[in-house]
């Protein structure tokens, strides 16, 4: 049994090293040539790996892009968790999306736009993602359930429906952020629209949101 566990551990370590090589190659290609140059063949050539190695880990470039965003968001997620202390479920939801949007800005338009390049990018399917692949909505689900238990959120609210509306709001706004080449004030608009929705599912729709207000505006 010990030998088998050791083998699995070594195998997974090698897979992670390969993922990181592919990720580094993808970032380099996009930074140097733009998203249009990001193909499986180009990524593999840059990484010095076979396409077989790529497809053992990713279904295609869209999944690699989603992996990159998850990888990049990890640092922001830790900062969000540190900022949550003393806040209620609604405020925690706004906090984690503020950090997510900061992450998207840091990652850049090229990579975020790449998420919308396929009609069926698995990145957006939060109902069927594995727990370990969750980016934000797993945390938001726990916030909403916590809000129900604490009597902040209406007890009859369907959590999956709420997650769909929250995700749809932010995803749609990010689409327009990409469409307007980053000149759209995504941070304020997402915060404003999420606040409206979260208050609509709150027991008290006038509940105070104790967060630092963001700079208002639509276009920058």
Image (cartoon, grey):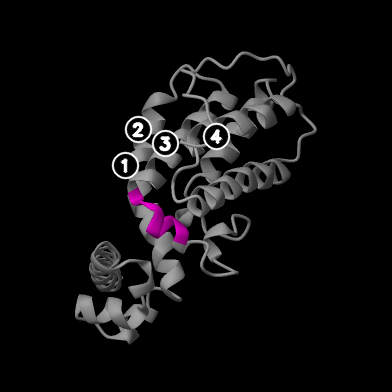
Looking at the rendering, the stretch of residues picked out in magenta corresponds to 107-113
Say above or below: 73 vs 60.
above
Position in image of residue 161 (x %, y %): 73, 45
Q: Which residue is mark 3?
A: 99
On residue 75, the disc is 1
Q: Which residue is mark 4?
A: 218
Q: Nearer the viewer, residue 200 or 106?
A: 106
Say above or below: 129 vs 148.
below
On residue 79, the disc is 2
Q: Are marks 2 and 1 in contact (CB under 8 Å)?
A: yes
Q: CA distance from mark 2 to mark 1?
A: 7 Å
Using the rendered view, name the quadrant where residue 13 is placed. bottom left
Position in image of residue 183 (x %, y %): 45, 43
On residue 16, the disc is none
Question: Nearer the N terminus, badge 2 or badge 3?
Answer: 2
What residue is drawn where x is 59% and y is 26%? 90
Q: CA distance from mark 4 to mark 2?
A: 26 Å
């Amino acid at each position: 049994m010990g030998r088998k566990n050791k083998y699995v551990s070594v195998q997974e370590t090698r897979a992670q090293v390969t993922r990181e090589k592919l990720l580094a190659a993808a970032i380099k290609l996009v930074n140097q040539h733009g998203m249009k140059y990001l193909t499986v063949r180009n990524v593999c050539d840059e990484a010095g790996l076979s396409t077989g190695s790529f497809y053992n880990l990713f279904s295609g470039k869209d999944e690699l892009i989603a992996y990159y965003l998850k990888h990049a968001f990890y640092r922001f997620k830790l900062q969000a968790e540190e900022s949550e202390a003393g806040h209620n479920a609604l405020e925690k939801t706004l906090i984690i999306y503020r950090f997510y949007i900061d992450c998207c800005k840091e990652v850049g338009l090229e990579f975020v736009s790449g998420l919308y390049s396929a009609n069926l990018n698995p990145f957006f399917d939060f109902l069927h993602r594995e727990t370990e692949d969750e980016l934000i909505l797993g945390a938001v689900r726990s916030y909403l359930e916590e809000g129900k238990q604490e009597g902040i959120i209406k007890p009859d609210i369907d959590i999956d429906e709420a997650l769909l509306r929250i995700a749809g709001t932010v995803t749609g706004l990010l689409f327009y952020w990409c469409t307007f080449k980053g000149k759209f004030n995504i941070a304020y608009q997402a915060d404003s629209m999420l606040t409206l929705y979260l208050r609509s599912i709150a027991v008290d729709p006038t509940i105070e949101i104790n967060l630092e207000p963001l700079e208002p505006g639509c276009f920058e």
